[in-house]
Image (cartoon, rainbow, N blue to C red):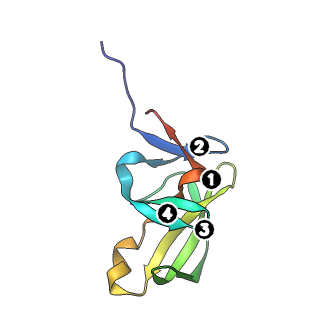
Amino acid sequence: MGDLIGPRLYSCYKCRNHVALHDDIVSKGFQAKNGRAFLFSHAMNVRSGAKEDRQLMTGLHLVADVHCADCGEALGWKYEKAYEDSQKYKEGKVVLEKFKIVKENW
């Protein structure tokens, strides 16, 4: 029998709560205040904060900060609405900062 290997995951760097699947990465080319970030089609075990309009490098977006559901650590943000047509693909997707997540099952 072969070893059972689960999906490749990302976890909160503080408490190891599973927050995203590697297969859900849309882009690794995002930039956050503190360095690189990944765009995921969705995240799990996270809570969204209040929605607010925020001026980002790619224009004005309605976003909500995303926190680990277990320890409350801020991990990134979710795009709730993009005001420019070229940015609509981000709607409903989640950005997680690379230094806030750790790889599991790699």
Q: Identify the residue shown where x is 59% and y is 51%.
A: 99
Where residue 48 appears, as percent x and y from the top left, is 58, 65
| C-alpha gap between disc 3 and disc 2 | 23 Å
- The residue carrying mark 2 is 17
Where residue 94 appears, as percent x and y from the top left, is 47, 63
- The residue carrying mark 3 is 33
Residue 60 left/right relative to 65? left
Q: Are marks 4 and 1 in contact (CB under 8 Å)?
A: no
- Name above or below for residue 84 compared with residue 90: below
| C-alpha gap between disc 4 and disc 1 | 16 Å
Q: Identify the residue shown where x is 39% and y is 32%.
A: 6
Q: Identify the residue shown where x is 62% and y is 53%.
A: 69
Tag 2: amino acid: Asn
Where residue 21 appears, as percent x and y from the top left, is 42, 47
- The residue carrying mark 1 is 69
Q: Does dot 3 land on a helix, a strand or a loop?
A: loop
Q: Crowdedness of circle 3 by 10 Å Cα count: few (<14), some, many (20+)?
A: few
Q: Are marks 1 and 2 in contact (CB under 8 Å)?
A: yes
Q: Which circle's residue, 2 or 4, is located before the other in the chain?
A: 2
| C-alpha gap between disc 4 and disc 3 | 12 Å
